[in-house]
Image: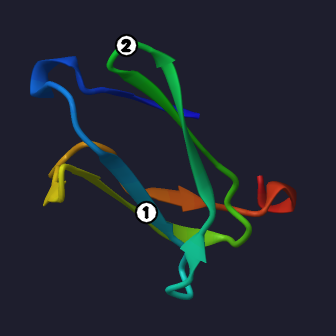
Amino acid sequence: MRVVDTNAAGSGNLEVMVTNPAGGTIYNYVKPLVTGIFGVYFTPTQSGMHLVNVSFNGEVICGMFLDFCCIEPSVI
């Protein structure tokens, strides 16, 4: 889970898109935790670099999440 705090931005629409290494979209669920704080839940299904894009009221928020690399547990 990742946490997004929108309190400084005011009210609006939060959108999150997670893309897997093959370019496919990973289902994610955004759940309000308390006023202005949201939990973003998703489960990677592939190894490799994943991209996370966050927008608020239609504007992309740069630097909201770092992209991340997922590896197979057997490789560790």
Percent position (x, y) of residue 24? 56, 83
Three-letter residue code for mark 2: Thr
Q: Is residue 63 above or below residue 47?
A: above
Percent position (x, y) of residue 38? 44, 27
Residue at 70% over, 72% down: 46
Three-letter residue code for mark 1: Met
Q: Nearer the viewer, residue 49 or 15?
A: 15
Q: Kindly give the residue lying farthest to the bottom in the view shown.
A: 22
Q: Nearer the viewer, residue 68 or 64?
A: 64
Label 2 secondary element: loop
User: Image check: 2 left or right of 53?
Assistant: right
User: Image check: 56 left or right of 51?
Assistant: left
**Neighbour tally class for label 1: few under 14, some 14-19, many 20 plus, Cα within 10 Å:** some
Q: Earlier in the sequence, mark 2 or mark 1?
A: 1
Residue 66 seen in the current view:
no
To which residue does mark 1 refer?
17
To which residue does mark 2 refer?
35
